[in-house]
Image (tube, rainbow, N blue to C red):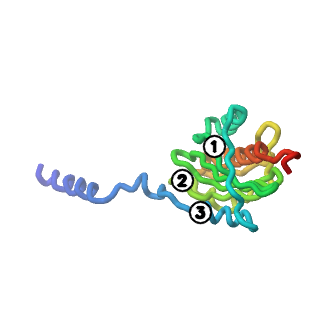
Amino acid sequence: MTKLLKPIFTLLLLALAYPHTSDAKGAKEETYLSQEDFLTQTFNEGVPTPKALWLTKSVKPTVKEILGHDYPAARIRYWRDGNRSAWILEEIGKVKPITTGIVVEDGKIARLKVLVYRESHGWEVKYPFFTDQFKETELTEKKRLNKNIDGIAGATLSVNALKKLSRLALYFHQVTEPKDSEK
């Protein structure tokens, strides 16, 4: 009996001695581009003063339609220079938020960049082969993207999160577009 317990006890000690990495492995927060660098790259003539879009009663229903839930903030910071706006938005992939920078120009996506990724799977969405698909994408009257975005095997939830955020940025761009009297 003692001969049987010794190997089991040794295995138990080894298991306790090594850190458990099943959740932490690959799931650490990775910053690919800072907010400041994203904005500097977006606005060559200098980053405009940030503005705030309040998620009012008139805006919230469409936000909920796009995301499938309410946005977790009451207001969204954004930057606008003429027909170009920049949005830094977050959406949950599987369990953690993906921070994404989206540039909209003349009602079309000019750039989509994953700034911070926190999930253990689906990180391939950060690469240009995926994000470049969003360029020139517009929002239809039904608040859908006018182009098909190809998915990535094993990254469905991350892909869906970025599709939702791109729709949201396009919608927010429309909502904040200066009226003719303000131009």
Crowding at dot 3, Cα within 10 Å, few <14 / some 14-19 / many 20+, comes out as few
Residue placed most toward the observer, 174 or 54: 54
Amino acid at the residue labelled 1: Arg
Return the mark for residue 7. none
Three-letter residue code for mark 2 = His
Q: Earlier in the sequence, mark 3 or mark 2?
A: 3
Rendered residue at 13%/54% (across/down): 3
Q: Which residue is mark 2?
A: 121
Within-10-Å neighbours for mark 1: few <14, some 14–19, many 20+: few
Decide which of 104, 153 is in the foreground and name it.
104
Q: Secondary structure at mark 2?
A: loop
The x and y percentages for residue 59 are 71, 36
Q: Which residue is mark 1?
A: 75
Q: Which residue is mark 3?
A: 34
Element at label 1: strand
Which secondary structure lies at badge 3? loop
